[in-house]
Image (cartoon, rainbow, N blue to C red):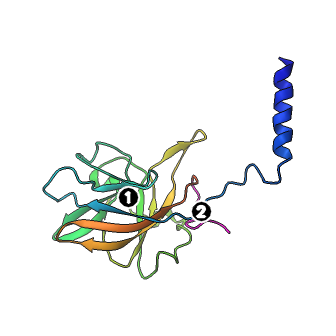
């Protein structure tokens, strides 16, 4: 059993000898685009929601089929709108916030006032706007936490019921920064 103590001390000393801080986690911006389709489209199969944590579109055959999505696209009265899971009766901590009159690059931090985020009703889809997303929760180091991301429409086709958008997500739990620190 003494060799375990020796190995533990050696590991700690080797980490202490490094110039880099072992606990200094970094991330880089990685904006990407994705496409989702309106729930109102007649065919089955195209992805109608987006999971910001997984950075991928999600096919919703029934709203409650999975709680691992953050925003869905729907059409009402000929207009596209965004739905958080709660708007479809799905239990989730996912929330959306519309920020009008700003650019994607100008949004550096998710607002901290949780009352500004929408959890249970549709939001209009506006070209040129930026949306901040508080994602569904994941378990990280034994605690449940959300992540924050942002997106902006790039191409909106209300007739076809499609949305192509630019997005990015902070990979760190409960960190509201939307751009990496310098």
Residue at 51 percent of width and 55 percent of height? 147
| 108 over 84 or under it: above or below | below
Nearest the viewer among 7 and 121 is 7
Q: Residue at x 18, y 67 (%)?
A: 160
Quick one: 133 or 14, which is closer to the camera? Answer: 14
Residue 123 percent coordinates (x, y): 32, 67
In this image, 45 relative to 66: left or right?
left
Task: Say which element carries label 1.
Answer: loop
Residue 119 bears which disc, if any?
A: 1
Q: Main secondary structure of the magenta part?
A: loop
User: Pointer 1 and pointer 2: residues touching (CB < 8 Å)?
Assistant: no
User: Crowdedness of circle 2 by 10 Å Cα count: few (<14), some, many (20+)?
Assistant: few
Q: How many marks?
A: 2
Q: Is residue 5 magenta?
A: no
Which quarter of the figure is the C terminus placed in?
bottom right
Q: Which residue is mark 2?
A: 28
**Disc 2 element:** loop
Q: Is residue 122 visible?
A: no
State which quadrant residue 87 falls in. bottom left
Ranked by sequence position, the earlier of labels 1 and 2 is 2
Quadrant containing the N terminus is: top right
Say if the magenta span includes residue 179: yes
**What range of the chain is rendered magenta?**
174-182
Q: Position of residue 134 (x, y in %)?
A: 46, 58
């Amino acid at each position: 059993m003494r060799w375990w103590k020796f190995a533990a001390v050696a590991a700690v000393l080797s980490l202490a000898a490094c110039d880099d801080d072992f606990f200094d986690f970094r991330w880089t911006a990685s904006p990407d685009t994705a496409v989702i389709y309106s729930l109102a489209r007649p065919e089955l199969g195209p992805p109608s929601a987006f999971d910001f944590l997984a950075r991928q579109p999600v096919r919703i055959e029934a709203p409650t089929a999975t709680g691992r999505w953050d925003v869905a696209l729907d059409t009402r009265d000929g207009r596209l709108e965004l739905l958080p899971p709660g708007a479809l009766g799905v239990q989730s901590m996912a929330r959306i916030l519309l920020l009008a009159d700003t650019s994607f690059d100008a949004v550096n931090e998710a607002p901290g006032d949780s009352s500004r985020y929408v959890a249970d009703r549709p939001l209009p889809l506006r070209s040129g706007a930026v949306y901040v997303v508080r994602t569904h929760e994941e378990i990280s180091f034994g605690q449940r936490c959300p992540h924050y991301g942002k997106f902006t429409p790039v191409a909106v086709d209300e007739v076809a019921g499609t949305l192509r958008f630019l997005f990015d997500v902070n990979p760190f739990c409960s960190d509201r920064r939307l751009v990496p620190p310098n």
